[in-house]
Image (spheres, rainbow, N blue to C red):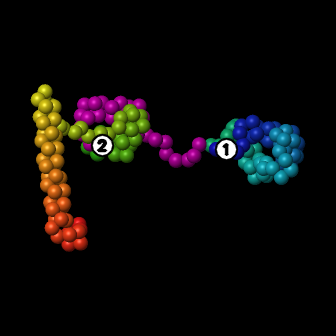
Amino acid sequence: MEQWGVVHRVFAYDEFVRSNESVVAAQRAFRQRFNIERHGAIPNRKTVMRWVNAFRTTGSIMKKKPPGPTRTATTPENVERVRAAVVQSPGRSVRKQAQALRIDRSSVRRIIKRELKFHPYKLAIVQQLKPTDYRQRSEFALDMFSLFEVYMCEVYMCGNIAENILGKSKIPKY
C-alpha cells in the first residue's frame, strides 16, 4: 500500500510551486495541512522532487507502470482459441493443448485458470450401481460382522482358558 495518496502528492506539488520551489516550505505546509506531529512522517526532499519531476515530465504525479513486456498471450483471441480447444477436447492435457495451439504451456494454464475459470480434475470411472447392490452390500456386512463376532468370542474364550490353565504370567503378550 502506498503511504502517500493522490491528495497528499497534489498538495505537496502545489505548495512546492507556490513557495518558489522550496521543498522545506512545502514540507512545513504539508505538516500543517495534514496535522502531522513534529516528528511524524512527512515526504522527504527526494520524494517531493520525484513527484515534481514526474508531474513535469509525464503530467501525472502517480507512479509509472512497471517496465517490462506486456502480456501478449492473454489476448481475447487466444482466450477464445483456448476455450474452443478445451471445450472440443476436455480430456487433453494442458501440455498437449499448448502444443496444439502453439502457445506457451504456462500461458495456457494461466488462461484456463484465471480467464476461463476452469479447474483441472480427473474423472474417476466407477461401476454402475444396480438395484440389487444395496441388498448384497447389507448381507455382506452382516455376514462379516457375524464372522468377526465368532472369531472375537473364540479369542476371548481361548484367552480365558489359557489364563486358567497356565496362569497369567505365562501368557505371551503381543
Q: Is residue 164 magenta?
A: no
Q: Residue at x 28, y 30 (%)?
A: 87
Among numbered discs 1 and 2, the one appearing first in the sequence: 1
Q: Is residue 89 magenta?
A: yes
Q: In this view, does 171 lie above or below 6?
A: below
Q: Which residue is drawn at 79% across and 48% down?
A: 42
Which image quarter holds the C terminus? Answer: bottom left
Left or right: where 6 falls relative to 100? right
Q: Residue at x 79, y 38 (%)?
A: 11
- Which residue in the structure is indicated by mark 2? 94
Q: What residue type is labelled 1?
A: Glu
> Crowdedness of circle 1 by 10 Å Cα count: few (<14), some, many (20+)?
few
Left or right: where 130 falls relative to 50? left
| Percent position of residue 30, x then y | 83, 42
- Which residue in the structure is indicated by mark 1? 2
Q: Nearer the viewer, residue 9 or 168?
A: 168
| Percent position of residue 8, x then y | 76, 39
Q: What element carries label 1?
A: loop
> Crowdedness of circle 2 by 10 Å Cα count: few (<14), some, many (20+)?
many
Res 50 label:
none
Q: Nearer the viewer, residue 54 or 9?
A: 9
Which image quarter holds the N terminus? Answer: top right
* Residue 56 shows in the view: no
Give the extent of the magenta segment. Answer: 65-93
Q: What residue type is labelled 2?
A: Val
